Image (cartoon, rainbow, N blue to C red):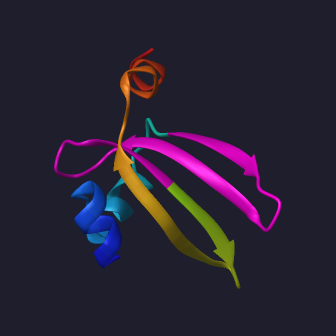
Amino acid sequence: AESNLRKHGINFAEVTSVLKDNNAITIYDEHPIEDRYITIGMSDLGKLLVVVYTLRHNKIRLLSARKTNKGESQQYFN
């Protein structure tokens, strides 16, 4: 969590609100090691973020979060 905060300026506490965004877009990512999900959504602080996570033991494990790029933002708003 600290490395993500340093690298992207995104706090994992804020990230959880993205997963509650009713307009969020979630894409399944078949990763070689584990199934992953990529969600584009709006945080409670009004930041449009990309969140990558996996499910382990029926719990969400956050892997990374960052601000969207132009294409991801367009995907969310269109």
Residue under the image location 29 percent in, 60 percent down: 7
Chain part drawn in magenta: 25-51
Marks counted in the figure total: 0
Residue under the image location 23 percent in, 42 percent down: 47
The foreground one among 24 and 69 is 69
Position of residue 17 measured from the top left corner of the image (x, y, whole percent): 33, 58
Residue 72 figure quarter: top left
Residue 75 drawn above or below residue 5: above
Quadrant including the C terminus? top left
Residue under the image location 52 percent in, 46 percent down: 39
Is 12 within the magenta? no
Residue 31 figure quarter: bottom right
The foreground one among 53 and 46 is 53
Residue under the image location 51 percent in, 67 percent down: 63
Compared across the picture, whether 57 is left or right of 2 comes to right
Position of residue 67 measured from the top left corner of the image (x, y, whole percent): 32, 42
Compared across the picture, whether 56 is left or right of 76 comes to right
Task: Check the image and name the residue furthest to the bottom.
Answer: 57
Residue 29 drawn above or below residue 1: above
The foreground one among 35 and 7 is 7
Quadrant including the N terminus? bottom left
Position of residue 44 measured from the top left corner of the image (x, y, whole percent): 22, 52
Residue 54 drawn above or below residue 40: below
Compared across the picture, whether 59 is left or right of 29 comes to left
Magenta stretch prevailing secondary structure: strand
Specify whether residue 14 is in view: no
Residue 24 drawn above or below residue 4: above
Position of residue 15 measured from the top left corner of the image (x, y, whole percent): 34, 60
Compared across the picture, whether 4 is left or right of 22 comes to left
Specify whether residue 32 is in view: yes
